[in-house]
Amino acid sequence: MSRSPDMLKLLTYLHDSELVARFQRRCGLVLVEGAHHSLVRLSAPSGTPAHADVPRGQLKGRRDHQDNNSNYKYKENGCAVAGFSRPQYEVRNWLLHFLFLFSAGLGHEIFYITCLPCIHWSLDPFLCRRLVNMWCLVMYIGQVMKDMLKLPRPLSPPVVKLETRVDAEYGLPSTHAMAATAISFTVLLSAPSRIQFQFEVGLLIALTLSSLVCLSRLYTGMHSVLDVICGALISAIIMFLTYPYWETFDRFQLTSHISPIVALTLPLFLSYTYPELDHYSTTRGDTTTILGVGAGCSVGYWVNEQLGQTFEPKGVLPVPLPTLTAHALVLGAARFVVGVLALVGTRQVMKTLSLHVLYLWYRVSKNDDSARRRREIEVPYKFSTYTAVGLVNSILVNKVFILLGLLSPSILTLRTHCSSSAMFVSSSQGLTSSRMEDLATSAGFLDFLAAYSARRCSLILSASALSASSSEPNRSMSSSLVSFVVAGRTN
């Protein structure tokens, strides 16, 4: 019984805004002496008590208050707080300042649309597929938990807030911490079977990156210590529970006939049924964006597998890390520029088209910027836009690199092979894996289909001949027809 008050005190301490402010001061981010918010008070309706009940996640008549772009609203001494001026601050350690700002950027859309695809373009699409799957899962769970728990972000002052866009969101758990933990350790756990590297070094890099992102959320004043700790722990628990099923999900994602249907309908359903809030927040739009990217990539990887065309590291797995030569760096930079232009261009075109169609459908003025916050517009336009981005990234970009001569054969090669379902059928008919590989590498996928058709004709005609009669004329006709099909393929 005595542990409950102690635990409550610990949680309260970890969620205290003053703890975040002390961390900021230790890192050289100091609130200017005498700086404070200016409050614009609006008279509350008559008869409204100063401590009236407010929805969960809001404060009651406390002196503490959030800044203007807060994730909750309240009344202070019977008056509604309508506006604030942001506190001024002084940076005394510019090295840590830029380090933490850069680390915080690792959880923003600009990072997801520029840096994450580089793993697909320059390292291994397999690793990109794995981390996108885990990224979508942990981010959806984290975003929903935020809007279900409704715990506020740190108060300003005493905290200095360096970001404003997501301040209307709730705080716990930190999805930046969840995403950083999931991405870093998903790559770490999946890479040993694909790439040769020293595991201890990879572990150190994963810990460093995830720690920098977590600390950056404290430095920017967007999360409490409790938010960050819970985010990292929840992500670790999700990875621990799902890790045994990663291979099973890989097979389903690439080979199942219902995989693209599930990949499109389930994320769209989750986007439409996202929890409603009493105020507008960016969480639903951001969650739809993430789910759209995951849906597009999943369908793209399935299409590649069914077409029998995948990009793989050259050599026997696990392959050594590619050598960083000047030529490789130039090609990598060119791939980055072309790839980002392709994705950003796709995003812009699809966003414009989808909004235009939705505005016409719902008869909304194009000048009404608030209309895109409505669920019936926000969800379909974001989902369609970022599904297209995922499709372009997983299907088209690497092929564009080949056309432009930007994909170095020493890094990734286009392997044309039969799909997994065709491999299963062929092996059941007696076609060996070595023969399939020879067909795939020498003649391509179409030649493989021709050989497979000839094999099927042979089996069908042989079975028909044996069932009808065992006479010599029938066997001769069967052999002649098979010879004709094979000869036609050869010619």
Image (spheres, rainbow, N blue to C red):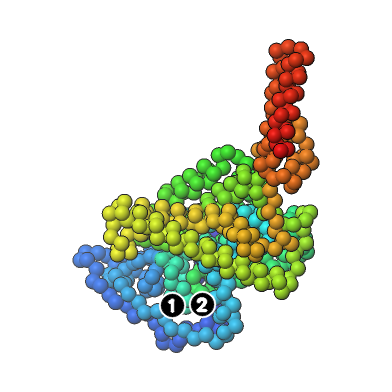
Q: Residue furthest front?
A: 491
For residue 334, above or below residue 141: below
Quarter of the image for residue 447 reads top right
Quarter of the image for residue 61 reads bottom left
Helix, strand or loop at disc 1? loop
Query: Left or right of 405: which side holds 94?
Result: left
The amino acid marked with disc number 2 is: Ala
**Residue 21 badge:** 2
Residue found at x 76% / y 34%: 431
Instruction: For residue 237, say whether it is visible.
Output: no
The amino acid marked with disc number 1 is: Pro
Q: Which residue is mark 1?
A: 157
Query: Left or right of 430: which side holds 26?
Result: left
Give the quarter of the figure containing the N terminus: bottom right
x, y (%) of residue 432?
78, 36
Residue found at x 70% / y 31%: 485
Residue found at x 48% / y 57%: 386
- Decide which of tag 2 and tag 1 comes sooner along the chain: 2
Q: Are marks 2 and 1 in contact (CB under 8 Å)?
A: yes
Helix, strand or loop at disc 2? helix
x, y (%) of residue 39?
32, 78
Instruction: For residue 447, say whether it is visible.
Output: yes
**Residue 215 badge:** none
For residue 38, above or below residue 422: below
Residue found at x 62% / y 60%: 403
x, y (%) of residue 208?
66, 70
Task: Estimate the spatial distance between the alpha carbons at disc 2 and disc 1, rounded to whole Å.
Answer: 9 Å
